[in-house]
């Protein structure tokens, strides 16, 4: 069974930094797109950042220039470096990945989410 597990969330002051990590485990033949979404209370889930297997990146407009996504294919991990955090970055952050598993199909998997709270 494929699982994505996030870590690194927490409480940080405005202007601070956090680094989120997400590890994929299970019987995995290939990982394609990997990304981060977030959902704040009362709001829809939104794209934060995405990275392809080749390393091309896409960012949501609200985080461009502040957040950076990266991945380690050998470790089956994706990271989100968040700098210059703002109160409005407070949300539950979800890791997602398109994975070719033992089922021989590519499916989108999601982590359980990690809370990021930006507050003084």
Image (cartoon, rainbow, N blue to C red):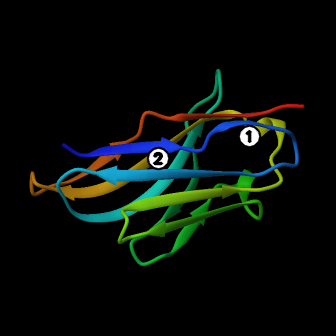
Relative placement, left or right, of 75 versus 16 is left
Q: Secondary structure at mark 2?
A: strand
- The part of the image, by quadrant, that contains residue 91 is top right
Residue at left offset 35%, top offset 71%: 74
Q: Can you name the residue that lies furthest to the bottom here?
A: 54
Q: At which x and y percent is residue 114?
A: 55, 35
* Dots 2, 1 in contact, CB < 8 A: no
Residue 6 lies, with reference to residue 50, above or below; the image says above
User: From what the image shows, is residue 41 above or below residue 106?
Assistant: above
Residue in view at x 17 percent, y 54 percent: 27
Report the quarter where the C terminus lies. top right
Q: Earlier in the sequence, mark 2 or mark 1?
A: 1
At x 37%, y 65%, the residue is 75
Q: Nearer the viewer, residue 102 or 65?
A: 102
Q: Is residue 74 left or right of residue 69?
A: left
Residue position for label 2: 95
Horizontal side of 46 relative to 117 (left or right) equals left
- Toward the viewer: 7 or 119? 7
- Residue corresponding to mark 1: 89
User: What is the distance, in whole Å, between disc 2 and disc 1 at their CAs?
Assistant: 16 Å
- Dot 1, how many residues are within 10 Å of its Cα: few (below 14), some (14-19), or many (20+)? many
Q: Residue at x 77, y 56 (%)?
A: 83
């Amino acid at each position: 069974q494929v699982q994505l597990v996030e870590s690194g969330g927490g409480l940080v002051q405005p202007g601070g930094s956090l680094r989120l990590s997400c590890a994929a485990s299970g019987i995995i033949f290939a990982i394609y797109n990997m990304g981060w979404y977030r959902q704040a209370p009362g709001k829809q889930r939104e794209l934060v950042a995405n990275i392809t297997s080749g390393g091309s990146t896409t960012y949501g407009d609200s985080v461009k220039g502040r957040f950076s996504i990266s991945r380690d294919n050998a470790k089956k991990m994706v990271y989100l470096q968040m700098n210059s955090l703002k109160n409005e970055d407070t949300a539950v952050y979800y890791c997602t990945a398109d994975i070719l598993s033992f089922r021989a199909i590519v499916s989108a998997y999601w982590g359980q989410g990690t809370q990021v709270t930006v507050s003084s």
